[in-house]
Amino acid sequence: MPAKGVAAVNPHPNRLAVIGGGVIGLAVARRAAQDGWRVRVHRTGTPGASWVAGGMLAPHSEGWPGEERLLQIGLASLALWRDGFLDGLPPEVVTSRESLVVAVDRGDAADLRTVGDWLSAQGHSVTATTAARDIEPLLAQTIRHGFVAETELAVDNRAVVDGLALHCERLGVEWAGPVTALDEVSDAEAVVIANGIDAPTLWPGLPIRPVKGEVLRLRWRRGCLPIPKRVVRARVHGRQVYLVPRADGVVVGATQYEHGRDTAPSVAGVRELLDDACEVMPALGEYELAECAAGLRPMTEDNVPIVGRLDDRTLVAAGHGRSGFLLAPWTADTIATELRVREGVTT
């Protein structure tokens, strides 16, 4: 990756328009600016999916048989997070440096064994345990089975978005309003479509659909048990819930269902998350319920994002689903490679 915080040594005059101001658009814009492009980001100014994400960088604990490609690029992107992507961001954006994945009942434990065996078969073993409470004492007393993914990280999603935007500004990236058609950015030599669920409005036929997910923020209060130090992901009677530490509490997520473009948190969804979170970690029942929110994940059929070239001028970086933060560095690198090929640069 190029040196961080400064533009390329030999900047070229070509303009790049990045459509989308979430974590993907900002990561692409920052990398292009570092490579010497004159970059303009078109964004709406309203919070999107990046603002309500959990911020987990978790290729192991998110993995499932049949998603080998997603595991491969997720591991590559996690390595990029550690190898330079955090440069230029505040150090406190990292909120956890390990994941613990646990099971509530026997069926859930069987699912975890399935994931563990699959990861091992891929050459990426995780550390199984039958004493999960020795690792995380805040877990419910009945929880024993799980595995540890020692290399996974979690980040404060909002701090990352703000940090990327500030870094982009230091690199000279310009801001502009949203666009509804590609001919509105005709002055740009290259365009990257990175506006999530709205990508098909700019390039009809892109197989991306919105999938609703609700997320809660629980704030620590005086007298409560301490905030967990690691991400805790759990299977709860077949459902999944995650608990992600923040400086002031825990993020709990996330439901997932097809509901068009509805972003209103539902009573049923919030209740399910609270019930599952407290079944896994009963002490959370004493925290403050600080925020309920819902976002729309841009999903593809196979959960693998669509990143690459659409025509000589237009590229796409969309469809990241639940893996937007994890795959931001890999996406930025992939688009940067395509842009270099366009300019005839092969190194």
Image: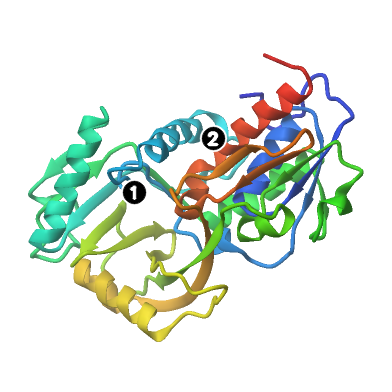
Q: Work out which quarter of the rendered image holds the C terminus and state it.
A: top right
Q: Position of residue 241 (x, y in %)?
A: 30, 63
Please tell me whether mark 1 sits on a helix, a strand or a loop.
loop
Q: Position of residue 247 (x, y in %)?
A: 44, 59
Q: Position of residue 207 (x, y in %)?
A: 57, 53
The vertical placement of 14 against 301, above or below, is: above
- Can you identify the residue that label 1 sits on? 62
Across the whole image, how many numbered discs are drawn on residues? 2
Identify the image quadrant of residue 283: bottom left
Q: Nearer the viewer, residue 79 or 121?
A: 121
Q: Residues within 10 Å of mark 1 (few under 14, many from 20)?
A: some
The vertical placement of 329 against 248, above or below, is: above
Q: Residue at x 77, y 33 (%)?
A: 312
Q: Residue at x 59, y 40 (%)?
A: 307
Whether residue 161 sits left or right of residue 35 in the image: it is left
Please tell me whether mark 2 sits on a helix, a strand or a loop.
helix
Residue 330 is tagged as 2
Identify the image quadrant of residue 254: bottom left
Pick out the residue farthest to the bottom.
Answer: 267
Q: Position of residue 291 (x, y in %)?
A: 47, 76
The vertical placement of 12 against 86, above or below, is: above
What's under tag 2, amino acid-wise?
Answer: Trp
